[in-house]
Image: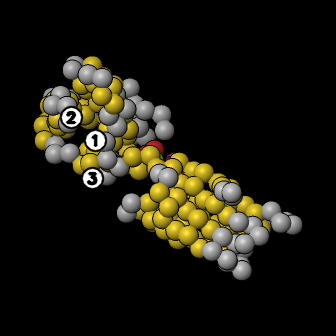
Amino acid sequence: MADIVAVWEVSLSDGVHKVEFEHGTTSGMRIIRIDNKEILRRNWMFKLVGREHFQIGKVKASINIDASGGFSYEYSLEVNGKALKKFKEQRKKSARVWTPIVDGHEFRIVLEKDSMDVWCNGLIVETAGVFVDDGSETHFTLSSGVACYIKNVSSGKKKEGIIHSLVINDNEIPEAVE
C-alpha cells in the first residue's frame, strides 16, 4: 500500500515535473518518484526525520522530513537550495512560459531571460536574434515547421524592464500561468 505523503509540481525549462514522496512512518521507508519514475528508494530507515537529496534533471533538490508532534510529520521541498515557494517566485522573474496550440499540436515554449535560451517541449531550439526599430526579436521554428519569434521591447519603466511577447502567425500568444 502506498504511503504517498506529498506531491509537488516543479516548473523547469524542460517541462513541469511531478515529484511524489512516499514515507512509511512505521518502517521509515522513503521513495521519491519524478514523473511517475522511481528515482530513490530506502527501506527500513530507523531515523524517521531528515533530508533526502536528489536531482530533477540537472537541478538539485531535497525533501525535508520534520517531526511536527506525536507521530506526524511535515514535508517540504527545496529546489536549487530554496524553498519551493521562493524558487517559483524567482523562476517567475527569470523565465517566460507560453503554451500555445498550433495546428492541433501543443507546445510549451520557455524563454530563459538570463541566457535568452529558448526551449520548446523540453529541448533548446536554435534561434536567430534580429534588431528591429522598437527592440529585438528572437526567431525560431517550432518542430511542426511553423516560424515564430519572441519580441523583446523596453517597457519604458525601470521596474518593469523588458517585455517579452511570443508571436506566432502574426498573433500574440498570452503568457501561461504556472
**Residue 153 is drawn in which quadrant?**
top left
**Viewer can see residue 49:** no
**Viewer can see residue 170:** yes
Q: Position of residue 178 (x, y in %)?
A: 49, 38
Q: Secondary structure at mark 3?
A: loop
Q: CA distance from mark 1 to mark 3?
A: 15 Å
Q: Upstream in the sequence, badge 2 or badge 3?
A: 3
Mark 1 nearby-residue class (10 Å; few <14, some 14–19, many ≥20): many
What residue do we see at 12% from left, 37% from top? 130
Q: Upstream in the sequence, badge 1 or badge 3?
A: 3
Q: Does residue 76 appear left or right of residue 100 in this picture?
A: right
Amino acid residing under circle 2: Leu
Q: Does residue 141 appear left or right of residue 103 in this picture?
A: left
Mark 3 nearby-residue class (10 Å; few <14, some 14–19, many ≥20): few
Q: Say above or below: 166 vs 70.
A: above
Name the residue that disc number 1 marks. 120
130 or 174, which lies in front? 174
Q: Secondary structure at mark 2?
A: loop
Q: Say above or below: 142 vs 122.
A: above
